[in-house]
Structure formats: structure tokens, C-alpha cells
Image (cartoon, rainbow, N blue to C red):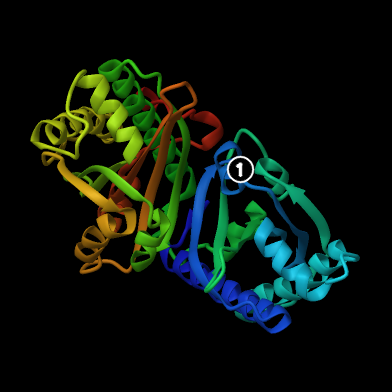
Amino acid sequence: MQIDIDALETYNDLARDGAESAAASLSQLTGIQTRVDVTNVSLASAADLRYEFVGREFAGVRIALGGAFSGETVLAFDDRAREAITDVLAPDGTMERSAVEEVGNIMMSGFIDGWADHLDTGIDMSPPTYVEGSGEEMLPTNVASGEQLMMFRSRVQAVDEAVDFRICLMPERATMAEAMEPPSDSGIDFEKLEVFNEMTAAGSANAAGNISTMTGIDADLEVNRMSFVPIEDVPAQVGDERYVGTVLQYEGSIGGYLVILFDQPSARAVVDAMMPGGSEDGWGEMEQSALEELCNIMTSGFIDGWANVLESEIQHSPPQFVADMGSSILSPVVGRMAESQEHAFLLDSTIETADDRAFRCELFALPNERELTAALDALLVERADQLEADPSEVF
């Protein structure tokens, strides 16, 4: 299956427009003023996609789509959003479930209308089915385990309140293939994207292993996904949590940037493991150097997998220490990349552990879109059912 980059951009814009329409409907019904925070197209396994709903309880609706555009979509409100909606529409405490279903149905009609207008055809919507829970319980039912899936994701937050809701649209593969078929052979092979995403997961697992080797902390890869996102939206994907980490640039057959970010307690934990008895006051030169050394070795484990698959050399600059909000760290990187591209493939991996020295680390890779497209075009990959993303079998 070929994926047209221009079509990806168009449908990503449709997802944002649909999310804005849904947000406007919510505002009209409840008075809650909202903004669209994140919209992207993600390629990930079912296990990774569940992290969209991990950590909190959600309630919302699931709607099946049919006709010219088949698939399934889920609209999920977090607890505060659900409470805000029911306080307005069901203040006596009864019919709360019906209120969520009604709001969800109206919002999703607005979300889907733009897609129908673009395709110049009708899209059938099933009656809304009420859903609640977390993790995989909130995913569309057409999410199959054991394969990589493409999902349109939007996150909307209230302007003045700590509430949000998420929209996840999972088209059927046949629908996606027809909608995104390039006009010529100029598209990206979907199977090659899958291979590259799995190679990135393998590189992230290597990076996690390097953390364990250098610190003694047992680290594992928890999440790995590839997102296609407007370049100006990349900082919002990372958020405003404060991080400590490094930024570096790589070049070769694929150029771009790699940003490795630890939350502050995690950064302190790994540096303490590398420098027992070190200072706990701030980030001095020794602590910064220790973290840069760790991130340099993590980068080698991450990048080497790409180089092996592409049979080419990829070099990277020394990691530069950073400490700031995630969005502020990514903004200068995005500013440089925006000079040559409007959208980006964002590779997002999360490494964490749940033991008594729990920590969390995120890797954000931003390859140059043109160079990534050329590298994928050069891959000699068999059909997906004949290749298990083993680097020794790619060529």
C-alpha cells in the first residue's frame, strides 16, 4: 500500500478541522471554551496506542463508520470533562450517561462532516455506544493486536479548566489505501514505514539497555510510535512538563535531530547512579557531563539500528545539555526544521521502569522529511507477511 504525503497532510488537516468543529459543538452545548491542543496521524502497535488512555479514567462514545469511509471512531472525555458536561446537561445527577451519549453524537457528527465533504460522499454513522474505562478499553474495537496501525488522534483541552477530551479515528485499511493512494509511484510504501518504525523500536530498546548497563537501573521500552504532525505542532506533542536532557543533530543518509528528555527526578536518579555521592544541588558541570555521556551512548544504540538497515553511516554531534519545559526545548529545533518542511515524522519512544528507583525517559527523533522519504524509497523490502523487520533480511 502506497501512502501519499500530500494526502497525509490533507487528512491531518481534516482531523484538526473536525476536532475544532467538535470543540465548537461542545462549547455551544455547555459553555466550556476549548482549544485543539494536538492533532496527528500515528503509526503504532495496539499495545502502544493504548497509552493514549492510560493513567486516567475516561467516558465517551464509540461510533462505527460505513459507506465510502469505513472504520471506527472514539470520543473520550476525562473525568473532569465528563463532570463539567453532566453538571450542565444533567444537574440533578440522573441521565448522566444519556447526556454523554447525546453530546458525543452531536460532536462526532461535526467531526465527520468535514471528511464527508472532502470525499464528496455520505458517511454512515452508527448510533453512539457508551464506553468508559482506561487503556485498551477505550480504543476502537477494530484495533487488532499484533500489527501496526494508523490512527488519527486529536486532543482538545479547555481554556480555563483542567479538562480535556480525545478523538481517535481508525479507518479500515482498505479505506485508508483508497483515500491516500498517490497519483503516481511517488508515495511512501506503508510496509516500509512499518519496518522503519520497528527499527526505531529496536533502537530505543538498545538505548534502554544502555541505561541499564551504565546505571544498574532496569529500564524497558514501554511505548514506541511514529506520528505525522504539522511541524509547528511538535512542541505541543511534548508538553510543558520540565525536563533535563540533551539535544543533538545527526546527518548521513538521514539527517535530523534527536532529543532525549528525563523528568527531573529521573535525571537525578541516573546521574546519582553514575556518580555516587555527587552533589544534589543543581546541575553543575560534572552532572551535566555525566548526563551527556549517558545520552551519547544511548544515541549510539538508537542510531546504529538505522545505519545498519540503511547500510550507510549516520554521524551525530555531541549531545548538548538542556533543562527547560519540553515545548521550549523543542521550539528551537522546530524553528530550524520549519525552514525546509511544513510537516514532520515525529518518532516518540518512552523508556521507564516501575521499581523503587522509578524513572521515565522520552526520546524524540525528528528526521528530515525529504531524506527519510528517500531512504525509505531505497529500502528493498518484501511484502509485510514475508518480513519480520529483521535488519539482516531487509536487503
Give the residue at the far bottom of this rendering. 28
Q: Nearer the viewer, residue 48 or 286?
A: 286
Q: Residue 248, how many percent across, how many down?
A: 18, 45
Give the residue at the far left of this rendering. 285
Q: Residue 207, how many percent across, how many down?
A: 31, 28
* Residue carrying label 1: 50
Q: Residue 220, how many percent across, how many down?
A: 44, 25
Is 40 placed left or right of 295 in the picture?
right
Is 111 placed above or below 72 here? below
Is 207 placed above or below 51 here? above
Residue 328, picture quadrant: bottom left
Q: Image quadrant for the C terminus?
A: top left
Amino acid marked by disc 1:
Arg
Is 88 placed above or below 209 here? below
Q: Residue 383, how many percent across, how many down?
A: 51, 37
**Residue drawn at 74 percent across, 77 percent down:** 122
